Image: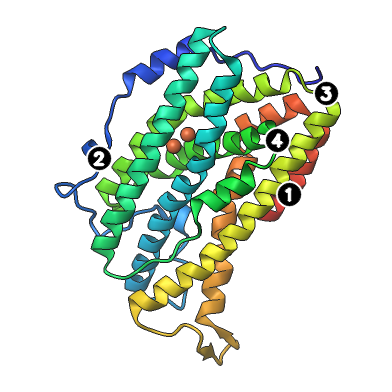
């Protein structure tokens, strides 16, 4: 064994905290809880629409809604590979530590509930937005690619995503002073975050468990798997930016490819540049640089941490 252990989390504490959270999908979304399209869905720190000079304030709001839709779509996508990872882990650990078994089963049940929630959101968004929005997928193809990799590599991606979710909510959504966000959308984020707080700790334990029997070479291979999946997701995010542009043109009814002769750049070019940076910062660097993710990676491998840090710097 080469990895060191982080001993700050226990299955008993996680089970106790999980028992305090008890919401159902129907409590958060439905005909009696409409989305308010007069307000932004995402805070500026997660949407980065206000610096786009070629869009009017109304058009920036439309792009914010498109980003809100893709934000939850992307969570739904990744949860479709997190769920089988967790189910496989429960099967592998059996019933020796029954609190661990119970905690991971709760994790899997909650992720399946989140997939349901985000599908319900997608239907409500489609009904309220009034224009078709393009999103990457299908989720099954992405899950097939990701799950070809080692369980520890996939668990590291999951750990990244779980801590990233914590960072998004705590840094940008919980205290969104001065930003009149749609309360319904914020409620979805808040309830999702409440359960993800347990998942982040469970995944820390899962990463340790999976690494326990691996030698240095196998851990290095898992870090390479993590990096390969991150690069794959980066390509997916770039594709999502292109799809957002199509959705935006359709929703605002104007062609964004016309060139502004003052700087020879099209509106499309400006939006693409800002939004690619935004997606990379929000979905990649914010997970790769989260202190708790960093702590887990450093405990596995100093060389692996150096590799991941170098890539994270490209996405900041
Ligand atoms: Fe989730
Ligand atoms: Fe989760």
Is residue 47 toward the left or the right of residue 7 in the image?
Answer: left
Q: Within the displayed image, which quadrant is ligand 1 positioned in?
A: top left
Say few, some or many: other residues with alpha carbon within 10 Å of mark 2 (under 14 / 14 to 19 / 20 or more).
some
Q: Which residue is disc 4 drawn over? A: 150
Gap in Å between the C-alphas at discs 1 and 2? 37 Å
User: Mark 3 or mark 1: which comes first in sequence?
Assistant: 3
Of the residues tagged 2 and 4, which is closer to the observer?
Answer: 4
Q: Which element carries disc 4, helix, strand or loop?
A: loop
Gap in Å between the C-alphas at discs 4 and 3? 14 Å
The disc placed on residue 215 is 3
Gap in Å between the C-alphas at discs 3 and 1? 24 Å
Q: Please name whichever residue, 217 or 66, is drawn nearer the observer in this view of the structure.
A: 217
The disc placed on residue 28 is 2
Q: Which residue is disc 1 drawn over? A: 311
Q: Quadrant of residue 262?
A: bottom right
Whether tag 1 and tag 2 are in contact, CB under 8 A, the answer is no
Respond yes or no on whether mark 1 lies under 8 Å from ligand 2.
no
- Residue at the extreme left: 32
**Who's the residue at 57% across and 32% down the image?**
85
Of the residues tagged 4 and 3, which is closer to the observer?
Answer: 4
**Who's the residue at 72% across and 45% down the image?**
227
User: Mark 1 or mark 2: which comes first in sequence?
Assistant: 2
Whether tag 2 and tag 3 are in contact, CB under 8 A, the answer is no
Q: Position of residue 56 (x, y in %)?
A: 37, 76
Of the residues tagged 1 and 2, which is closer to the observer?
Answer: 2
Which corner quadrant holds the N terminus?
A: top right
Q: Which element carries disc 1, helix, strand or loop?
A: helix
Q: Position of residue 156 (x, y in %)?
A: 64, 34
Gap in Å between the C-alphas at discs 2 and 3? 45 Å
User: Mark 2 or mark 3: which comes first in sequence?
Assistant: 2
């Amino acid at each position: 064994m080469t990895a060191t252990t982080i001993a700050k989390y226990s299955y008993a504490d996680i089970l106790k905290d999980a028992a305090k959270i008890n919401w159902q999908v129907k409590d958060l979304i439905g005909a009696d809880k409409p989305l308010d399209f007069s307000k932004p869905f995402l805070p500026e720190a997660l949407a980065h629409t206000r610096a786009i000079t070629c869009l009017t304030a109304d058009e920036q709001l439309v792009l914010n809604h498109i980003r809100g839709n893709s934000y939850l779509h992307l969570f739904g996508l990744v949860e479709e590979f997190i769920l089988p990872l967790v189910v496989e882990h429960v099967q592998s650990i059996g019933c020796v530590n029954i609190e661990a078994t119970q905690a991971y089963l709760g994790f899997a049940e909650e992720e399946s509930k989140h997939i349901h929630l985000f599908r319900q959101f997608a239907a409500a968004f489609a009904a309220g937005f009034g224009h078709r929005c393009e999103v990457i997928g299908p989720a099954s193809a992405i899950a097939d690619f990701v799950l070809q990799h080692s369980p520890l590599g996939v668990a590291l991606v999951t750990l990244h995503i779980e801590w990233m979710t914590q960072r998004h909510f705590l840094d940008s959504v919980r205290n969104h002073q001065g930003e009149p966000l749609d309360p319904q959308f914020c409620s979805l984020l808040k309830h999702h975050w409440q359960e993800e707080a347990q998942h982040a700790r469970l995944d820390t334990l899962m990463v340790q468990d999976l690494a326990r029997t691996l030698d240095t070479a196998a851990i290095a291979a898992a870090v390479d798997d993590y990096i390969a999946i991150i690069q794959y997701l980066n390509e997916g995010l770039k594709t999502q930016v292109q799809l957002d542009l199509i959705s935006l043109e359709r929703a605002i009814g104007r062609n964004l490819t016309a060139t502004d002769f003052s700087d020879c750049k099209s509106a499309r070019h400006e939006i693409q540049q800002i939004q690619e940076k935004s997606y990379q910062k929000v979905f990649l660097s914010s997970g790769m640089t989260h202190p708790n993710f960093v702590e887990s990676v450093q405990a596995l491998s100093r060389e692996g941490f150096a590799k991941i840090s170098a890539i994270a710097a490209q996405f900041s």
